[in-house]
Amino acid sequence: MMHRVTHHHHHHHHRSLSRQLIFLDVPSDITIDVNGVRFALHKFPLVTRSGRIRKLISEHRDAADTAKIELLNLPGGPETFQLAAKFCYGINFEITTANVAQLCCASDYLEMTEEYADGNLSSRSEAYLDDVVCRSLEMCVQVLQQCETLLPLADELKIVSRCTDAIASKACAEQIASSFSRLEYSSGRLHMNKQVKCGEDWWIQDLSVLRIDLYQRVIEAMKCRGVRPESIGASLVDCAEKLLKRKPVLGARAGASAEAIEREEKTGLPDLERKRLCKLIDFHKLSEEASGHAAQNERLPLQAIVQVLYIEQLRLRNALCCSCSEEDRKTAPQSRSTSNGMFSAGLSPRDNYASLRRENRELKLELARMRLRLSDLEKGHACIKQDLEKSNSRKLILSVSKRFRKLKLI
């Protein structure tokens, strides 16, 4: 979406050539250098809108007729300054998500505020940000991408915080709306739940384009707003997958040494980004579906996979403890202690890649065995319940005893 900046006073005759503005009707009396690009302009339209240029020109009063000014580190560079200069001359242009962050920062740098002129560039760009961008999650993401090269000024002007808060609010509102949809269409619950699940978290893929530090800010805002942990976890997994796409497949070569594997690992996602992403994930809060997806994703760091598998292992143990006999409950703490020690060793910095791979395989095997046993227990429980509903005779008691003896032998 675009917003046209319009002016109602006299327009100077002009011509735009690449990055320079050249006005033919009146000779220029000021040259402004922005990152090596020179703009031949006029003092009057600039000083009426820009406090910074007004101050710089006042310092060159004793100089030659044509003043020369250099603007160092202007946010957005020559392209953004050209838009600011057009604004000073009353030339129409479009404010869009591709330039609004730059215009906000440049207008602050140039001091193009209401103090110098009504409806100045600062208030125009701020209005577009608040009234247009913050109403759309997609537009907020696009503006955040533009902020990557404008930090820390974009942070100081609260452009980042406004966009992250707007994204979190939109995601939260979507979940509330989907909850009402589930209540409203409870008669077709299974069908509706399937539709809502696909639609309510449509924003997940949009966030993965953000740089990791800005993505982290969005996630923190979502936590504060009360967005469901399952949705946040799904977003983190999606982001991790996309960040790790360029990561090479490790250990693909037969007989590769541990040192060679470590070197290959370092050529993928930078360690800093990998650590930041893993720190964001609270694996205990992931749903079983999200945990299962993460455990099978070979592109995630092994430490993360081992942690997910370990947590899933504990979940299954707890389920088994509720279904098993007292004898099974006594053996569970011993096994848990062993696994916990193995897990700690797996995450120790001293352990190498091969050790993690081995623990990963062991956890997967144990999880498979536990799932099989839990499935058998559930089947046995279902049969017992069926028998209880049919009859209360002594034959049933004998049948139940036989079933429990059979379960103990599994």
Image: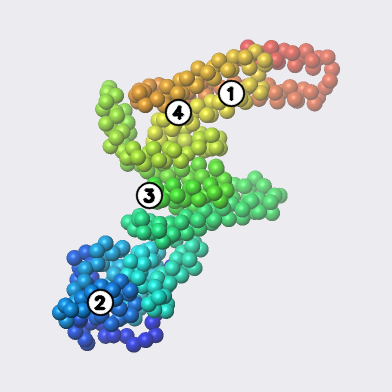
For the N terminus, give its image quadrant: bottom left
Q: Residues within 10 Å of mark 1 (few under 14, many from 20)?
A: many
Q: How many marks?
A: 4
Disc 4 from disc 2: Cα separation: 66 Å
Q: 60 or 132, which lies in front?
A: 60
Asked if labels 3 and 1 touch by Cβ distance under 8 angstroms, the answer is no
Circle 4 SS class = helix
Q: Position of residue 397 (x, y in %)?
A: 79, 15
Residue designated by label 3: 211
- Residue at 36% across, 41% down: 273
Residue designated by label 4: 306
Which circle, 1 or 3, is nearer the viewer? Answer: 3
Q: Is residue 21 left or right of residue 357?
A: left
Residue designated by label 2: 58
Circle 2 SS class = helix
Which circle, 3 or 2, is nearer the viewer? Answer: 2
Q: 245 or 279, which lies in front?
A: 279
Q: Amino acid at mark 3?
A: Arg
Disc 1 from disc 4: Cα separation: 16 Å
- The mark that comes first in sequence, 4 or 2, is 2
The part of the image, by quadrant, that contains residue 149 is: bottom left
- The mark that comes first in sequence, 4 or 3, is 3
Q: Residues within 10 Å of mark 3 (few under 14, many from 20)?
A: some
Disc 3 from disc 2: Cα separation: 41 Å
- Residue at 63% across, 17% down: 329
